[in-house]
Amino acid sequence: MKKVTMKDVEIVPAVGALFTDGVSRQNVFQPEDFNNFNFGIVRFGAGSRNKFHKHSGDQILIITEGTGTVATDDESVSVTEGDVVVIPAGENHWHGAPDATSMAHITITVKGSQTEQTEA
Protein backbone atom coordinates (compact mmCIF):
# COMPACT_ATOMS: atom_id res chain seq x y z
CA MET A 1 0.00 0.00 0.00
CA LYS A 2 1.13 3.54 -0.69
CA LYS A 3 -0.60 6.70 0.54
CA VAL A 4 0.03 10.13 -0.97
CA THR A 5 -1.20 13.44 0.44
CA MET A 6 -1.84 15.74 -2.51
CA LYS A 7 -0.70 18.92 -0.74
CA ASP A 8 2.73 17.31 -0.45
CA VAL A 9 3.04 16.63 -4.21
CA GLU A 10 4.87 19.40 -6.05
CA ILE A 11 2.99 21.21 -8.84
CA VAL A 12 5.35 21.91 -11.74
CA PRO A 13 4.86 23.61 -15.11
CA ALA A 14 4.16 21.20 -17.95
CA VAL A 15 6.75 22.31 -20.45
CA GLY A 16 7.51 21.02 -23.90
CA ALA A 17 6.20 21.12 -27.42
CA LEU A 18 3.04 19.21 -26.48
CA PHE A 19 1.62 21.94 -24.21
CA THR A 20 0.58 25.56 -24.60
CA ASP A 21 1.41 27.99 -21.77
CA GLY A 22 -0.65 27.72 -18.60
CA VAL A 23 -0.47 23.95 -18.01
CA SER A 24 0.90 22.35 -14.85
CA ARG A 25 1.13 18.81 -13.55
CA GLN A 26 1.53 16.79 -10.40
CA ASN A 27 3.28 13.46 -10.78
CA VAL A 28 1.38 11.77 -7.96
CA PHE A 29 3.26 8.50 -8.27
CA GLN A 30 6.67 7.94 -9.76
CA PRO A 31 7.05 5.43 -12.63
CA GLU A 32 8.87 2.99 -10.36
CA ASP A 33 5.99 2.97 -7.82
CA PHE A 34 3.80 0.57 -9.82
CA ASN A 35 4.30 -2.07 -12.48
CA ASN A 36 1.14 -1.49 -14.51
CA PHE A 37 0.22 2.19 -14.81
CA ASN A 38 1.21 5.87 -14.67
CA PHE A 39 -0.94 8.30 -12.68
CA GLY A 40 -0.86 12.10 -12.45
CA ILE A 41 -2.93 15.26 -12.34
CA VAL A 42 -2.80 17.88 -15.11
CA ARG A 43 -4.21 21.39 -14.65
CA PHE A 44 -5.09 23.60 -17.59
CA GLY A 45 -5.50 27.33 -17.02
CA ALA A 46 -8.21 29.09 -19.01
CA GLY A 47 -7.18 29.15 -22.66
CA SER A 48 -4.58 26.36 -22.39
CA ARG A 49 -4.51 22.84 -23.80
CA ASN A 50 -2.21 20.25 -25.21
CA LYS A 51 -1.69 19.71 -28.91
CA PHE A 52 -2.90 16.78 -30.99
CA HIS A 53 -1.14 13.62 -29.90
CA LYS A 54 -1.64 9.89 -29.48
CA HIS A 55 -0.51 7.29 -26.98
CA SER A 56 0.68 3.76 -27.63
CA GLY A 57 -1.53 2.58 -24.73
CA ASP A 58 -5.04 3.44 -23.59
CA GLN A 59 -5.56 6.62 -21.53
CA ILE A 60 -8.23 7.40 -18.94
CA LEU A 61 -9.04 11.01 -18.03
CA ILE A 62 -11.07 11.74 -14.89
CA ILE A 63 -12.16 15.38 -14.81
CA THR A 64 -11.71 16.73 -11.27
CA GLU A 65 -12.26 20.50 -11.67
CA GLY A 66 -13.74 23.00 -14.09
CA THR A 67 -14.90 22.63 -17.67
CA GLY A 68 -12.88 21.71 -20.73
CA THR A 69 -12.75 19.88 -24.03
CA VAL A 70 -11.54 16.51 -25.24
CA ALA A 71 -11.33 16.27 -29.03
CA THR A 72 -10.34 13.69 -31.63
CA ASP A 73 -10.03 13.98 -35.39
CA ASP A 74 -13.76 13.21 -35.63
CA GLU A 75 -15.47 14.72 -32.58
CA SER A 76 -15.19 17.21 -29.74
CA VAL A 77 -16.92 16.85 -26.38
CA SER A 78 -17.29 19.23 -23.46
CA VAL A 79 -16.25 17.76 -20.13
CA THR A 80 -16.85 18.86 -16.57
CA GLU A 81 -16.06 17.68 -13.05
CA GLY A 82 -17.09 14.06 -12.61
CA ASP A 83 -16.81 13.07 -16.29
CA VAL A 84 -14.57 10.16 -17.32
CA VAL A 85 -13.15 9.79 -20.83
CA VAL A 86 -11.40 6.72 -22.21
CA ILE A 87 -9.10 7.33 -25.16
CA PRO A 88 -8.07 4.12 -26.95
CA ALA A 89 -4.44 3.52 -27.88
CA GLY A 90 -3.54 5.19 -31.16
CA GLU A 91 -6.48 7.64 -31.22
CA ASN A 92 -5.35 11.13 -32.23
CA HIS A 93 -6.67 13.63 -29.66
CA TRP A 94 -6.12 16.71 -27.50
CA HIS A 95 -7.57 17.90 -24.20
CA GLY A 96 -7.58 21.05 -22.16
CA ALA A 97 -9.40 24.26 -21.31
CA PRO A 98 -9.40 26.24 -24.57
CA ASP A 99 -12.13 28.67 -23.47
CA ALA A 100 -12.60 31.01 -20.49
CA THR A 101 -12.59 28.38 -17.73
CA SER A 102 -9.87 26.21 -16.24
CA MET A 103 -9.96 22.43 -16.05
CA ALA A 104 -8.04 19.69 -14.24
CA HIS A 105 -7.99 15.95 -14.76
CA ILE A 106 -6.40 12.82 -13.45
CA THR A 107 -4.60 10.93 -16.20
CA ILE A 108 -3.98 7.19 -16.07
CA THR A 109 -1.98 5.40 -18.76
CA VAL A 110 -0.48 1.96 -18.96
CA LYS A 111 3.15 1.89 -17.92
CA GLY A 112 5.47 2.18 -20.88
CA SER A 113 2.88 3.99 -23.03
CA GLN A 114 4.63 6.39 -25.40
CA THR A 115 3.18 9.76 -26.43
CA GLU A 116 3.67 11.03 -29.96
CA GLN A 117 2.79 14.61 -30.89
CA THR A 118 0.96 14.67 -34.21
CA GLU A 119 0.70 18.44 -34.71
CA ALA A 120 3.51 20.98 -35.00
Image (tube, helix red, strand yellow):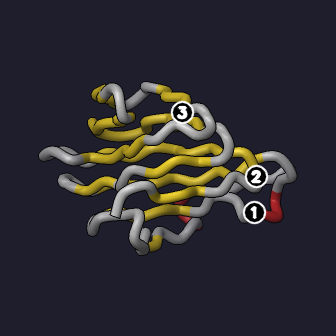
Query: Does residue 13 appear anywhere in the picture?
Result: no
In the rendered image, the vertical position of residue 81 relative to residue 45, given as above or below? above
Q: Amino acid at mark 3?
A: Ile
Asked if residue 116 lies left or right of residue 98, the reply is right
Q: Label 2, secondary structure: give it.
A: loop
The residue indicated by pointer 3 is 87
Q: Label 1, secondary structure: give it.
A: helix
Mark 3 Cα shell of 10 Å, populated few (<14), some (14-19), many (≥20): many
Q: How far separated are the C-alphas under marks 2 and 1?
A: 7 Å
- The picture quadrant where one finds residue 110 is top right
Q: How far separated are the C-alphas under marks 3 and 1?
A: 21 Å
Mark 1 Cα shell of 10 Å, populated few (<14), some (14-19), many (≥20): some
Towards the viewer: 114 or 104: 114
Q: Amino acid at mark 2?
A: Lys
Towards the viewer: 28 or 85: 85
In the rendered image, the vertical position of residue 49 relative to residue 69, given as above or below? below
Q: Amino acid at mark 1?
A: Pro
The residue indicated by pointer 2 is 111
Mark 2 Cα shell of 10 Å, populated few (<14), some (14-19), many (≥20): some
For discs 3 and 1, the disc positioned in front in the rendered view: 3
Locate the C terminus by quadrant.
Answer: bottom left
In the rendered image, the vertical position of residue 46 relative to residue 60, given as above or below? below
Are the residues tagged 2 and 1 within 8 Å (C-beta)? yes
N-terminal-most mark, 3 or 1: 1
Image mark for residue 56: none
Q: Position of residue 74 (x, y in %)?
A: 35, 27
Q: Label 3, secondary structure: give it.
A: strand
Which residue, as the protein is rendered here, is positioned at the far left? 100
N-terminal-most mark, 3 or 2: 3
* Residue located at (69% from left, 52% from top): 113
Image mark for residue 31: 1
* Residue located at (50% from left, 35% from top): 62
